[in-house]
Structure formats: structure tokens, C-alpha cells
């Protein structure tokens, strides 16, 4: 190897730092996540306790993620937020299990979570903002 | 300039331990090998070539008891050999160990998957406990045993346990565990020339020389 | 001193031997340490160094097998030797002394080890076969025995016989000197007994056990030699094959006793010194005599069995069918495990058409009869010896053979003694006697 | 250079900038995710921060290369702008501030007086004490004097970068400037070490954020580093770890193993002994980290990292030769020397043994007759 150009270069995927398993099979990770979701749902049903799983903290391969997505499926509600970038909250076919994606203004994914709750907390309007809104509406031109 | 425990373990401590090991081993061997050797003036029954080769052969044949003895000592020997094999597999085929030895000898060789080594370690550890159990419960072995036997066992065990803890990251941080592991190796190296661990150097020459002397008389071994 | 007198003394019938000197415990320890120190050499040190305390040797020893008493572990029998070596002579002896890793040898210890080294070891060499480190344990025990002699702790029977042999040539006094007895045996069995001839091929010696208990074996030896047409002779001044100096552990006495035979063999210009059926006499002359003599012997030393087997192979010896029924063979330890004479007796038996039923442990694995190493002469060793013998006797019965044969008069004597003790009807026969009874005359020219 | 009016809480500041509560929750959630904090922390952080006052921050640079500050300014979440404008009040930073000379000096003095006992002090770089501190001065005062003075009124000190946390490169043997870490100079104030050369930008801002959020010291390890970021070794969280467990190692930087992304342990990766968040938070907005780019960890966030031998010597390797990297020739020399010593001692022992040995007249016989056949 005499010149820099001779060094072979291969771009590795940025998306998938965890190497896909050579056999293409699914790891036990998916089963573990699903069973975790199940127990979180049970707690939600029993104690109205809501909880979250940060998908980026889990060592999931691309195949794992796709498998998880297809295992959870699609439900009735799709919500889209426009707040410092676009976000979506999608209920899966399991009621109470929500798939959240947050993107920044440039459209890059900044957080991906599963929320186990009656509805995602981020959707609720904030009390202080409601108060502000009331004030704003009162001061609206038409009501004066 | 800071010298942490790990730096000490694989730096000055290792160097001192290796120095004691090398000098001690040669010292101990030379101290008896240079004693008087009686010339055997009696006529040999076979040629020198023959009895010398019988001696070399005995290195292999003594590895397992004669059929007549297998019932009485086969299990004990099997136990002994299996944990020795385990120890050697761990020492010579575990990646980081190859790296360590490579750093001393300047060449490396392929190893086994670390998971396999972990399995071997677990088995070896169990066998090693079995060895102690046997030493304590057998009346003969207990009588023969002295500080050397127990301490040599302990030092070897220490190396194994700290090694496994290091690989499994159990009990403390990796560098602390690694330092303890290397320190235990240092201890083993220091103890080596003074105790029975020396049998590592003796076993093959002992088999060969004793058997050659017997073979010179035409006697079996 | 005793040594100097010994050479000048002609063999006499009866002498008053000086009593074994009584020594103080301090002198015992000092003597033993002197002995250990003398025995240390590269090889013995290597053997002592190599032991890994695995205890396997116990499993080869008939004393341990019979009693399961750990003290009979072969390597334990040299523990004081090991102790002395590590403390006084090993590379790190100062450390061993400083940290007390090995204690000093004590007189109490030596007294206990007298039992372990003499009463409970036949020097049979079976343990040397089992050691995974390959250590020749027996060699160490012989060395430790010599140190015990220096400590003044040789068993009194062995000491007395050794000293008697040293002074008179005979281990024991007899009503009639062995030389006259030999002539008598010749007359009784009508065999020519050439005595003190010169310029012969073969010089013969005799086990005193045979003279005292088995005269036919003495006659048989002479008969076979005459039959082979070999020129041979006995020597009045070198008659006794045994060496009690060796048993007692005195190298000086062993040397003086061996020298008698060596000098006689040289005096008659023999090409071969033939050792009759006596295991330890063979080992002492074959494997130790030259070292004590200081140079290689100018003649060959051979055991009668291997000599006869060689003659058989060469076609010089023809044997007829022996009428002994089925037989089993007791391998003398010193012949198989020290000299490799394993096939020779079997060739002879085969030539006589004897159906041999081997014992479970035969050849190189054969158990000692229990009498070897001088043990048969030690009174205090008797109870243990009989107990230990049971293993051997069981193996013999298990073969179902009619005749028990051996080629060692000490084995034979031990079995016959057991016959009386156990009140059994099994005596041992001499292979040599059976060979002598079945000589076939039409021998092809040599 | 105060970026905002004093007295406003973070929430008020945000609303002033038109950021909705949802936007802020989302922002905090993304931050928590990027910092590998538990997901509920995002919402909790948003809630707390909204009502928290914006603390005053003083940033002092000493014997350093500005790499840490460069890293600080490149934080993706929270971004430095966001942090500076919304969450903290960066009141003194000699690299960023427009003011200079006496104006800057007096700005610092007034912040220290006004916010005494409440401001956050960030220190970047080691403190040289050699030559009476002449190696690093500002306004005619040595780094040590400035630090001691600034430390007095600090609520907490963030030692950012390995130099200020553990001494770093200036502190490495032979340490010509007599450099020391902050913890060696200041003993009576709480110190949080944010080590790394440089530290991960998000770890700097995240630690700051965490302090602002909770108002108290985070859980620290024995090196006073936040466990949230320094709790795991690189090795434990490394995506190449499965290869280590399988015993698959790259042997050189351009072999098959390297191309297949195998473990870099044998190429000297210090991942097993290095505690940092590189493997989880990563660099450049979560793009990559050194191991992902094919180079082993050099252990820059550990005390004494510059003195721990070659970056390319495996962790398991022996380390006792002068070169740092053990060379077989040196080992041979070493072995030869020790073996010779052993042989001499052994021969001595044997000689003494022979002299002390008891000899009998028989030995003389054997001795005299030796050689004659």
C-alpha cells in the first residue's frame, strides 16, 4: 500500500450500529420488549400507571425494529404535532401502546419511544397555556 | 505521573515477579542438577540409543496408568489431567491471554471464542474444587499434603477466580478486576519456583530420566 | 575397621559378632542426617523434588492395599529423607529453615520410620511403575534405608546377619560350613560339584536359603550346568549369593560382601558369574556391584533363568514335558522390575509343555511374595507380612493352578513359611528344579 | 454579555421566545434520549426547568487547548444557543465574550459579587503551579489565584475536560509546568468532573442541564464523574462487544477482521478500562464514535491516560519495558539476565551443597578409580 488512495474504504451504515445477525433470525430482544410492554399494560390497566420505553436505548438491529413494528401493528389513532419540528403519535393495534416519533425542524429523528398510557402525555394541553389562551381570547378584538 | 493499581500490577510488579520466576526456576533446577551424578558402571542390558528412546517414550506412556492400575488411579489421573487441560486451554487459547503472551514472545496464535473459554473455566473451576475435596478427604493425600500443596492450590484458584470475575465484570470495575487478576498472576509467578508448581518443569524430564535408568536395566516402566 | 578385618578373615563356622551398638537419640539423628547428606545427588534430589503429593503410589503398594493405612504410602516412607533434603540441601534450604516449611528430623520420627522403611517395604518396585511423575520411589527407599543404618536403626536381625556375613562369609552360623554342605549335597543327589576350579566359563554361587532349605535346588543348578556341558565351578571363598549388607543398608558392608564374589570370579577367570534363583542377589550383583567395585566388572552377571532361556533359544537346551499339571508363576520382583527377566521363565515353562495360568497381576505387575527386601528375616514384621500376603495368596488361588512355581528361593521360602502359618497345602516349587528334572539327553552339539 | 434579562425562569424565557410546552417536552425528551437517561426524565425535566431560575455561569479557561470549549459549542441537544439563551445565563467566558481587558475583568468581578454562592463555575484546562504560576496568567494574575477566588462563591464547579478533571496532558510525565487538576487546588467546593479529551459535547451540556434541573449534585463515581454518563465502560456498551465475546479480533487496521468490524481489543482499544458515554451518546449528534470509525478507544476520559503506555498495546499486554510497548528483544534481554542470575545462584547452591555433603571412604574409592575402564 503506497498511496492513501489504495486504502480500501467501506461506508458502514449509520442507522445500524448493531450488526445484523448473520442468520437473519430475530434476537431474544423482541420477545423481551414485548413481554415488558405486556407487563406495563397490565400496570396501566390496574393502577392507571403510565410508562415509557426509549427505543434508542435498546440494542435493536434494523431487522429487530421492523419485527417489533410488525408485531405491534397499526391502530386507530394517528396524531401529528408541529412543535419545534414534526412529531407523530400512533396507537398500535394494542390499545394503550403508542409509538412516538420526534423529529427536529430539519426532519431528523431525535427521539423514538413507546408510551404505555391512555393517550400520550405530550398531546394534552398545558394548564398555564390554557390560562394564557383564555386571556388571549378575552383580549381578542372581537370580544371587546 | 500517576501509577494506578493496574499499572503497578502489569508494570513493576509483573517485572519483579517475572524476574523472581525466571531466576528462581533456574536457581532451583541448577541447585540440584549440578549435584554429584553417579556414573553407572554396571553393564547396560540394552544400547544407549534404545534406553534413551525408551525414556523419551515414557513421557507419553506415563501419561496414563498401566491397565492394572486404572481401576485404582484412573479416576484420580483423569481428574488431574482434565483440570490441567482446562488450565492450559484457558491460558493459551483465550484472546487476552494470547495478547499477553504475544506481548512477551512477539508472536500470537488463534484462540477460542470467549464464550467457550468461559464454559471451560466453569468446568475447570469445578474440577479444581474437586481436587481440593479429594486432597482433604483422601487419607493418603491429606497425610502427604503440606502448606505447599494448599498454597499452590490457593494461588492457582485465585488466578482463576479473579480471571473469571474480570471477564464477567463481576464485583468491581474492569480495571480493578484486571489489576487483581494480574496481581494474582504476579503472586503465582513469585511462588512458582518455591513450591510444587515446579512440577511443570519436572514432569517430562522426570518421566524420561527415571524410565531411561530403568530401561537401561531392561526393566519396564 | 570391621571392613579391614573382614578381608583377612577366612570364612569360619561360628564367630561371636559384636552387638549392634546402642546409640543415643542425638546420635541417631546425627547419623541419619549424615546418611541423608551422603545419599543426596542430582538424581535423588530430582526424585525428591518431583513428588507432587498425589498419593497414587499407595495404590500400587501391597502394604497399603491390604491395610488401607495411609502411612504405608510408598513416598511417605521417605518423608524424613525429603524433609532433610528440603531443609538442608535444596536450593532454598535457608528459606525452608527460616519459615519452618520443613521441620528438622527427630529421633521419634526415625524410630517410627524404621517400621515403615524396613518392616513394610519389600523394595519390590511396584510403586515406581505407577508414579505419574515417573519417580523411582524404590530407589529413594533404598537410600533412606542406608541413612537408617547410619543412624544405628537397621533392624537387629538384618544387622546381625549382615555383620556375620561380613565377618565369616555366612549370614548365619551353621553346624557344618556351607562348603562341606555343598559337597554333601553333591554326593546325596549324585551330581558333580566342581569346587575352586580355575579357568572356567561360569562361576556359580548359591543362595544360603537353598543350602539350608532346598538342597535339591543346589543340585539342580549343578546338574543343568553339567548337562549343558559348560565348564563351571563353585568357589569356597565366594559361595553365598545373598548380600545382607544390602538389606541392612550398609553400603560399606554390601561392598565388602560383593567384593568376595567379584574377586573369586576374577580369580577363576570366569566369563560369567551366574546368580541362581535369588532375586535380590541378582539385582545387587548385576546393578550395584560395579559401582561399589569402582569400575566395570570383567565378567558378565546373569540370572540362572535368563541363562537357561538363552540356552533354550540357542538350541543347546532340550526339555521334556514336565508332569506338574497346571501351574502359575510367581515373578520375583528383582528379576522383573529391576532386570526385565519376564519372558525367560515363561519360555522355559512353555518348552516343558506346562500350562500356565497367570495371576491377575503378573509379570511386571506381580505383587511381591512379602518376603523381599529382607522382610522375611525381620521378626517384628511378621504380623503385617502375613496380613499383606493374603492379597497374593488370593490371586494364586484364583488361578486354579495346581503348582506354584517361582525362580527365587526367598519367594519360595516365604511361601513355604506361609504354608505353615496359614496351614494350607500349597508349597512353591523351583523352576530350576523342574528344569533339572526334565532334561532331555539327546542334545545337539553346541 | 448577559444574554437575557435577569430574574426570568426558564419557562418564562421559553414562552417569551414562543416555544410551546409541547415543544419543550419534546425537546427535553429528545435530550434525555440522547443522553441515555430514563425516558420519563424528559417530561420531568421539562416540568422542573419551566419553574427553575436560570443560573449564572462563569467559564474559566486555563492551561488548555480550547478543544473542550469547541466541543461545548457543538452540542446538538441541548444546543449551546438554546442552553445559553434559554436555560443558563452565561455571564463570563473569555473566549466568547465581546468585552476585553478591564471591561471583561470587571464583568467577572461583578458576576462573582452579584451571584455569590449561586453561580456555576466551569473550569477548562489544568492549573500550572510551576514558576509561581507564570505559565498561565490573565490580567496579571495566575490561574491558581483566579481559580481560588472564583471558586469561593461557586455553588458547584464543573471541571470540564481531562486536564481540569485529572490533569490531562500537561500533568503527564514529566509535567514541566507543575500542572494540577482543579480538585488538587480547590478542596472545599463541590466538584463535578466531566472528563474526556474533549468530553462529549452532550455530556457537558447534559451535566449542566441536569444540575440546573435538579439543583443538586448528580450521583458521582469515585472519580467524581456523573454516573449517568460515566457509569459504564465503553466496552460494556460497545456494539462490537459480541465479537469480543466470540473471540473475533482485528489484528491490524487493514485486515479482514478490521473490515468486518471485529473487536479492536488486540489493537489496543482501552474500552474495557474507560468509562464514558461514547458508545451510547456518541459524537456529532449521535453520528459515530471512534470505535465505530475503526479506531480503538484511547481512554482519554481516564486519570493518567497519557501515561498508560501505547494506545496500540492491548490491555492484557505486559507493560514493564522502557519503551512502554513490550518488545520481544527487551524481554529476551530481561529473561537472559534473570536466568543468568538464577543459574549463578543455583550453581552456588549446588557448590555449597557439594561441599557440605557427607563423604565416606566409598566415595573415595569411586573417585580414585574413575576413568580406569
Image (tube, coloured by chain):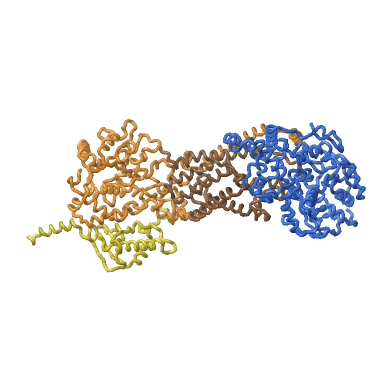
Chain colours: A yellow, B brown, C blue, D orange
Please give the name of the residue rendered at 83% of the width and 42% of the height, measured from the top-left corner.
C240
Locate residue A82: give its quadrant.
bottom left
Q: Is residue B215 above or below residue D353?
A: below
Q: Is residue A70 visible?
A: yes
Residue D283 lies left or right of residue C370; in this view the side is: left
Task: Give whichever of D281, B124 is nearer the camera.
Answer: B124
Q: Is residue C403 above or below residue C231?
A: below
Q: How many marks?
A: 0
Residue D329 lies left or right of residue C401; in this view the side is: left
Residue D344 lies left or right of residue D297; in this view the side is: right
Task: Give whichever of C58, C199 is nearer the camera.
Answer: C58
Task: Give whichever of D371, D49 is nearer the camera.
Answer: D49
Locate residue D300: give its quadrant.
top left
Residue C109 spot, x, y in % from top left: 66, 38
Task: Give whichever of A32, B113 is nearer the camera.
Answer: A32
Residue D370 spot, x, y in % from top left: 75, 36
Q: Is residue D333 visible?
A: no
Residue C128 spot, x, y in % from top left: 69, 48
Residue D296 lies left or right of residue C140; in this view the side is: left
Please give the name of the residue rendered at 59% of the width and 38% of the height, measured from the top-left corner.
C101
Looking at the rendering, in which quadrant would you find the N terminus of chain C?
A: top right
Residue A143 spot, x, y in % from top left: 8, 61
Q: Is residue D157 above or below residue C318?
A: above
* Residue farthest to the left, as pictured: A144
Please give the name of the residue rendered at 56% of the width and 48% of the height, measured from the top-left corner.
B132
Amino acid at each position: 500500500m503506497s498511496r492513501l488512495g489504495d486504502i480500501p474504504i467501506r461506508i458502514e451504515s449509520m442507522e445500524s450500529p448493531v450488526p445484523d445477525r448473520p442468520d437473519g433470525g430475530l434476537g431474544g430482544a423482541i420477545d423481551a420488549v414485548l413481554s415488558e410492554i405486556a407487563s406495563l399494560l397490565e400496570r396501566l390497566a390496574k393502577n392507571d400507571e403510565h410508562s415509557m420505553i426509549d427505543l434508542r436505548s435498546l440494542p435493536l438491529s434494523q431487522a429487530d425494529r421492523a419485527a417489533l413494528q410488525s408485531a405491534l401493528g397499526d391502530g386507530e389513532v394517528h396524531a401529528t404535532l408541529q412543535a419545534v419540528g414534526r412529531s407523530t403519535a400512533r396507537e398500535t393495534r394494542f390499545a394503550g401502546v403508542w409509538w412516538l416519533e420526534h423529529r427536529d425542524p430539519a426532519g431528523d429523528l431525535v427521539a423514538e419511544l413507546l408510551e404505555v398510557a391512555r393517550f400520550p402525555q405530550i398531546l394534552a394541553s398545558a394548564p398555564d397555556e390554557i390560562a394564557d389562551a383564555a386571556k388571549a381570547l378575552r383580549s381578542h378584538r372581537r370580544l371587546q | 505521573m500517576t501509577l494506578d493499581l493496574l499499572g503497578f500490577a502489569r508494570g513493576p510488579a509483573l517485572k519483579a515477579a517475572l524476574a523472581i520466576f525466571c531466576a528462581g526456576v533456574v536457581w532451583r533446577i541448577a541447585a540440584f542438577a549440578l549435584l554429584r551424578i553417579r556414573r553407572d558402571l554396571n553393564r547396560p542390558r540394552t544400547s544407549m540409543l534404545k534406553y534413551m528412546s525408551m525414556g523419551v517414550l515414557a513421557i507419553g506412556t506415563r501419561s496414563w496408568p498401566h491397565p492394572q492400575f486404572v481401576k485404582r488411579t484412573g479416576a484420580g489421573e483423569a481428574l488431574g489431567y482434565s483440570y490441567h487441560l482446562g488450565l492450559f486451554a484457558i491460558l493459551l487459547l483465550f484472546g487476552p491471554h494470547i495478547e499477553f503472551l504475544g506481548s512477551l514472545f512477539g508472536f500470537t496464535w488463534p484462540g477460542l471464542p470467549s464464550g467457550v473459554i468461559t464454559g471451560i473455566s466453569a468446568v475447570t473451576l469445578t474440577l479444581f474444587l474437586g481436587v481440593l475435596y479429594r486432597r482433604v478427604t483422601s487419607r493418603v493425600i491429606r497425610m502427604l499434603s503440606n502448606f505447599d500443596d494448599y498454597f499452590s492450590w490457593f494461588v492457582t484458584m485465585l488466578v482463576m477466580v479473579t480471571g473469571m470475575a474480570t471477564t464477567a465484570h463481576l464485583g468491581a470495575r474492569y480495571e480493578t478486576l484486571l489489576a487483581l487478576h494480574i496481581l494474582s498472576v504476579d503472586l503465582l509467578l513469585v511462588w512458582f519456583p518455591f513450591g510444587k508448581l515446579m512440577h511443570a518443569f519436572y514432569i517430562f524430564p522426570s518421566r524420561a530420566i527415571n524410565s531411561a535408568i530403568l530401561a537401561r536395566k531392561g526393566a519396564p516402566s | 575397621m570391621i571392613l579391614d578385618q573382614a578381608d583377612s578373615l577366612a570364612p569360619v563356622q561360628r564367630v561371636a559378632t559384636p552387638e549392634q551398638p546402642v546409640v543415643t537419640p542425638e546420635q541417631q539423628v546425627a547419623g541419619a542426617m549424615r546418611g541423608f547428606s551422603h545419599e543426596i545427588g542430582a538424581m535423588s534430589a530430582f526424585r525428591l523434588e518431583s513428588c507432587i503429593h498425589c498419593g497414587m503410589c499407595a495404590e500400587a503398594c501391597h502394604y497399603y492395599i491390604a491395610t488401607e493405612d495411609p502411612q504405608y504410602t510408598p513416598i511417605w516412607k521417605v518423608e524424613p529423607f525429603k524433609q532433610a533434603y528440603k531443609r538442608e540441601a535444596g536450593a532454598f534450604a535457608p528459606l525452608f529453615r527460616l519459615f519452618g516449611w520443613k521441620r528438622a528430623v527427630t529421633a521419634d520420627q526415625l524410630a517410627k520410620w524404621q517400621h515403615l522403611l524396613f518392616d513394610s517395604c519389600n523394595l519390590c518396585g511396584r510403586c515406581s511403575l505407577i508414579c505419574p511423575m515417573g519417580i523411582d520411589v524404590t530407589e529413594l527407599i533404598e537410600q533412606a534405608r542406608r541413612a537408617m543404618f547410619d543412624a544405628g536403626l537397621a533392624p537387629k536381625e538384618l544387622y546381625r546377619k549382615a555383620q556375620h556375613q561380613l565377618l565369616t562369609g555366612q549370614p548365619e552360623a551353621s553346624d557344618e560350613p556351607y562348603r562341606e554342605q555343598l559337597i554333601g549335597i553333591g554326593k546325596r543327589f549324585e551330581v558333580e560339584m566342581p569346587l575352586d576350579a580355575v579357568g572356567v566359563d561360569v562361576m556359580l554361587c548359591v543362595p544360603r536359603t537353598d543350602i539350608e532349605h532346598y538342597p535339591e535346588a543346589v543340585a539342580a543348578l549343578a546338574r543343568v550346568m553339567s548337562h549343558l556341558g559348560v565348564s563351571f565351578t563353585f568357589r569356597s571363598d565366594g559361595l553365598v549369593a545373598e548380600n545382607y549388607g544390602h538389606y541392612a543398608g550398609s553400603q560399606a558392608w554390601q561392598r565388602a560382601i560383593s567384593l568376595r564374589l567379584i574377586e573369586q570370579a576374577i580369580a577363576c577367570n570366569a566369563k560369567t558369574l551366574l546368580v541362581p534363583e535369588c532375586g535380590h542377589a541378582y539385582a545387587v550383583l548385576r546393578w550395584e556391584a560395579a559401582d561399589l567395585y569402582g569400575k566395570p566388572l570383567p565378567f558378565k552377571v546373569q540370572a540362572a533363568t535368563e541363562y537357561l532361556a538363552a540356552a533354550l533359544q540357542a538350541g543347546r537346551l532340550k526339555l521334556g514335558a514336565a508332569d506338574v499339571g497346571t501351574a502359575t508363576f510367581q515373578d520375583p520382583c528383582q528379576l522383573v522390575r529391576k532386570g526385565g527377566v519376564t519372558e525367560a521363565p515363561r519360555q522355559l515353562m512353555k518348552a516343558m509343555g506346562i500350562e500356565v495360568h497367570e495371576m491377575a497381576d503378573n509379570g511386571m505387575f506381580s505383587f511381591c511374595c512379602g518376603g523381599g527386601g529382607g522382610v522375611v528375616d525381620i521378626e517384628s514384621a511378621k504380623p503385617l507380612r502375613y496380613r499383606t500376603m493374603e492379597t497374593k495368596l488370593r490371586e494364586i488361588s484364583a488361578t486354579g493352578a495346581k503348582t506354584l512355581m517361582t525362580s527365587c528361593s526367598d519367594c519360595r521360602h516365604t511361601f513355604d513359611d506361609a504354608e505353615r502359618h496359614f496351614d494350607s497345602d500349597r508349597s512353591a516349587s523351583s523352576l530350576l528344579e523342574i528344569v533339572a528334572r526334565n532334561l532331555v539327553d539327546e542334545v545337539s552339539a553346541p | 454579555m448577559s444574554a437575557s434579562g435577569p430574574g426570568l425562569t426558564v419557562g418564562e424565557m421559553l414562552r417569551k421566545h414562543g416555544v410551546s410546552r409541547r415543544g419543550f417536552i419534546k425537546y427535553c425528551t429528545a435530550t434525555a434520549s440522547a443522553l441515555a437517561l430514563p425516558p420519563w426524565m424528559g417530561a420531568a425535566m421539562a416540568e422542573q426547568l419551566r419553574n427553575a431560575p436560570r443560573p449564572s455561569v462563569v467559564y474559566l479557561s486555563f492551561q488548555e487547548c480550547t478543544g473542550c470549549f469547541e466541543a461545548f459549542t457543538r452540542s446538538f441537544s441541548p444546543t449551546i444557543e438554546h442552553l445559553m439563551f434559554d436555560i443558563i445565563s452565561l455571564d463570563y467566558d473569555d473566549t466568547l465574550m465581546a468585552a476585553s481587558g478591564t471591561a471583561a475583568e470587571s464583568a467577572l468581578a461583578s458576576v462573582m459579587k452579584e451571584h455569590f454562592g449561586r453561580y456555576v463555575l466551569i473550569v477548562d484546562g489544568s492549573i500550572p503551579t510551576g514558576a509561581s504560576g507564570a505559565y498561565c496568567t490573565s490580567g496579571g494574575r495566575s490561574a491558581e489565584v483566579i481559580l481560588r477566588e472564583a471558586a469561593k462563591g461557586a455553588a458547584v464547579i464543573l471541571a470540564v475536560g481531562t486536564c481540569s478533571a485529572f490533569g490531562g496532558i500537561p500533568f503527564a510525565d514529566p509535567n514541566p509546568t507543575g500542572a494540577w487538576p482543579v480538585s488538587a487546588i480547590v478542596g472545599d467546593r463541590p466538584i463535578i468532573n466531566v472528563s474526556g479529551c474533549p468530553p462529549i459535547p452532550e455530556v457537558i451540556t447534559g451535566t449542566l442541564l441536569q444540575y440546573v434541573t435538579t439543583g443538586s449534585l448528580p450521583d458521582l463515581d469515585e472519580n467524581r464523574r456523573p454516573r449517568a454518563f460515566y457509569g459504564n465502560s465503553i466496552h460494556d456498551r460497545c456494539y462490537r462487544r459480541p465479537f469480543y465475546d466470540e473471540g473475533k479480533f482485528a489484528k491490524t487496521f487493514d485486515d479482514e477482521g478490521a473490515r468486518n468490524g471485529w473487536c479492536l481489543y488486540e489493537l489496543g482499544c482501552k474500552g474495557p478500562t474507560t468509562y464514558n458515554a461514547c458508545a451510547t451518546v456518541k459524537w456529532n449528534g449521535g453520528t459515530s464514535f471512534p470505535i465505530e470509525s475503526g479506531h480503538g478507544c484511547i481512554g482519554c476520559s481516564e486519570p493518567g491516560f497519557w501515561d498508560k503506555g501505547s494506545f496500540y498495546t492491548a490491555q492484557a499486554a505486559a507493560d514493564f519495558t522502557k519503551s512502554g510497548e513490550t518488545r520481544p528483544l527487551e524481554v529476551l534481554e530481561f529473561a537472559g539476565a534473570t536466568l543468568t542470575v538464577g543459574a549463578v545462584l543455583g550453581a552456588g547452591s549446588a557448590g555449597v551443597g557439594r561441599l557440605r555433603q557427607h563423604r565416606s571412604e566409598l566415595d573415595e574409592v569411586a573417585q580414585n578409580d574413575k576413568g580406569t575402564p
